[in-house]
Amino acid sequence: MSLRIIKSAITAEQTDDAHLARLLLLLYQRSDKKCDAVNGITKLAKMDFLLRYPKYLQRVVDNKFKRPFEVVRQSYEEDTVESRMIRFRYGPWDHRYRRWIGLLLAKGMVATYVEGRTVYVKLTNKGKLIAKRFSESDDFKDLSLRSSQVERAVGAMSGTALKDKIYEVVPELSGMVWGQEIDI
């Protein structure tokens, strides 16, 4: 692995910008759907898990589709991720989701609303414009394509069904201790 890739991974982990861009791209895939909001922060986290860990997204695709497609990923993503997630009670999690959603909300890029006990997150018009620019950028090409694949594979699933599918295809999560970092 090159020093450039290692430095890039460290920088991505330490700044919010890369995470915000990734979430914008993920939410952008829903922006033209009938239900353009992700229903729940935990569901957003599970979708983001599959975006961050393409190896596990490939497992979902292989398990779910009669004609699986090849997940967009680079060779360096086989043994590294730009930032790790931890094993949490309801699946993969990163403690910064509420912060990131708050930052996107403060910047006017997302709107949130609550129905029952569920927080819905969706892009605003400003967020759509920025996410569209990212999706058209060469720097975000792979991430944008993989975001589309995540939406195609699991976007219509409920949060519970998605959790169950992740535990089915990534059984090693079940044996992990809460708070333990998830390896590639």
Image (cartoon, rainbow, N blue to C red):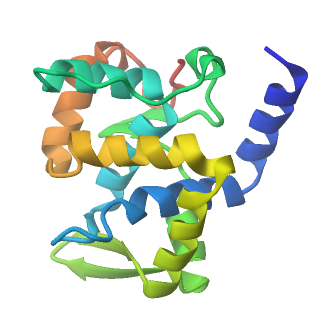
- Residue 74: x and y in percent read 59, 24
User: Which residue lies at the image location 28% right of the left edge and 14% below the top edge?
Assistant: 171
Q: Is residue 10 left or right of residue 77?
A: right
Position of the N terminus by quadrant: top right
Q: Is residue 159 left or right of residue 175?
A: left
User: Which residue lies at the image location 39% right of the left edge and 27% below the top edge?
Assistant: 71
- Residue 116: x and y in percent read 15, 76
- Residue 107: x and y in percent read 61, 83
* Residue placed most toward the observer, 109 or 89: 109
User: Which residue lies at the image location 23% right of the left edge and 69% below the top edge?
Assistant: 118
Q: Is residue 176 above or below residue 8?
A: above
Q: Is residue 134 above or below residue 178?
A: below
- Residue 164: x and y in percent read 17, 32
* Residue placed most toward the observer, 176 or 172: 172
Circle count: 0
Q: Is residue 111 above or below residue 159?
A: below
Query: Is residue 79 something one can see in this rendering?
Result: yes
Q: In which image quadrant can residue 46 be found? A: top left
Query: Is residue 48 something one can see in this rendering?
Result: no
Q: In which image quadrant can residue 31 be found? A: bottom left
User: Which residue lies at the image location 63% right of the left edge and 37% below the top edge?
Assistant: 83
Q: Is residue 183 left or right of residue 36?
A: right
